[in-house]
Image: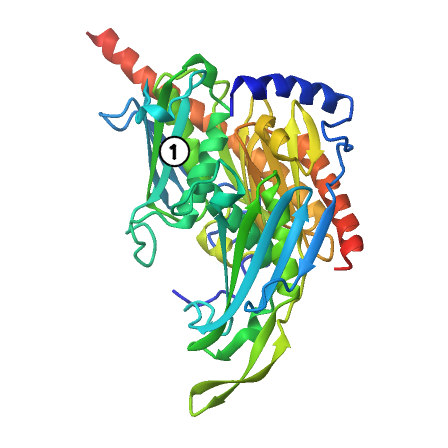
Amino acid sequence: MSSLVTRVKLKQIEQLVAKGKRLDGRGILDYRELKIEQGVIEKAEGSARVLLGKTEVLVGIKVETGTPFPDTPNEGVQTVNAELVPLASPSFEPGPPDENSIELARIVDRGIRESKAIDTAKLCIEPGKKVFVVFIDVYVLNHDGNLIDASALAAVAALLNTKMPNYEVEDGEVKIKSGYTPLPLKSHPITVTLGKINGSLIVDPWLEEEQVMDSRISMAINDEGNICAIQKGGSGYFAPQQILEAKNIAMEKATELRKKLGW
Amino acid sequence: MNEKPEKLIDKKGLRLDGRKADELRPLKLEVGVLANADGSAYIEHGKNKILAAVFGPKEMHPKHLSLPDRMVIRCRYHMAPFSVQERKSPAPSRREVELSKVIRESLEASLFVELYPRTGIDVFIEVLQADGGTRCASITAASLAIADAGIPMRDLVVACAAGKVDDTVVLDLFDVEDKLGAADVPVALMPNLNAVTLLQMDGILTPEEFEKAVSMAMEGCKQIYVMQKEALKTKYMAIKEEVEEE
């Protein structure tokens, strides 16, 4: 983090950002090029690959039957897991999930959960006993910064692509029938992350900017343009005014992305 | 116990525990409560009971984690198995891992890490009883513990949440409101610098409600800040009196 190289670069990046420019030629409020490909894994019930610049994230979705949580007996279950796969970056190491991958998974989870994106009431098979469990697995394939937005987009894209097995209940036994129905979705949250470099806010920080920024803020925006999840990260701080500024930028960028994606 | 109250706010605008919308729960703060720690603090925030301890700055162990130009902060937020209604496994949950990270980051902004190269400090937080808003109470206590350890700081970090319950934006949600309410926005603040070091949110808020919640939480922080400083002074007043008696 604090190597000499990044300090020299910090100065360069800071000076550029102060002029409203960035090392990779983008404007400070521009996203990198975004590509989404759905249905890339046939054996998964849903999948999507997102390319955000050189950042690449694959999300696979498996739908299985399981037991509901005791406090929500009539609702299906959603779980998100994130793997920072070692092949994605020299800084990722094999082993159990570290705090970064847990935080990433929980941010993606919160965006989907709090916006009530998955209509969990429709995933109930037998109240209190059997429901569908939607496993959302985030697989980071190449780390070039802003894993949060790429993963959140990939997760929703994969959910949009997810089909649930048809079933019927016979004598209390769940039988999977042939054919599929689309997973019922109610919202399509879009998460926008801003980095703070020397007091300036930038949208979609890439790897080198992430190494020099002191903090970030991610906001998930739902279909109605309301905020449904926020996470500040990094060891720096935001002035209250900057939070409101970040909120306005995030809402604007989310609307822009929504239009482009047709969500 | 499991009955869901119909309304979280009554006709008079009072909440389930009798508070007004912008009212904090009762707070008790104590500094220097653990003999072995370099700094420690205890907070009772409503029914939350939390201990925080700080060790260091000391040489970083294991050594390969030390940084040549700054201090490393490690933080563990942990809930006791008996702190909640149903026993919580003592193994760290994903929630605890995430909270440890965001609490560490919220405290780090207040420290002059570059003054202590190659060292580390450990911040340990034990939630003995939880009743909603533990991350905020933990930050308030941990920051006091750091001050108690004599580590130079830009400002104390103080945290408080606001949220939405029924249709009202309210301050300092307790457990039931947190679970049944519409949204929760924890905020940590360094009041003298007007700097927000932690901001999270879950639930759905309109942009206007969000603005209101943030400013309400910041007002709550400022109220707790006064008590935080008072708690620090109380400890050193007691020491002064002891010395004068001798």
Q: Which residue is at a point 32% across and 59% down the rendered structure image?
A: B86
In the picture, the quarter occupied by the N terminus of chain B is bottom left
- The image's colour scheme reads rainbow
In the picture, the quarter occupied by the C terminus of chain B is top left
Q: Which residue is at a point 55% across and 64% down the rendered structure image?
A: A61
Q: Can see residue A105?
A: yes
Q: Can see residue A116?
A: no
Q: Which residue is at a point 75% across and 44% down the rendered structure image?
A: A253
> To which residue does mark 1 refer?
B75
Residue A208, image x and y in percent? 62, 29
Nearer to me, B19 or A114: A114
Q: Amino acid at mark 1?
A: Cys
Residue B19, image x and y in percent? 51, 48
Nearer to me, A117 or B239: A117
Nearer to me, A148 or A117: A148
Residue A106, image x and y in percent? 51, 50
- Label 1's element? strand
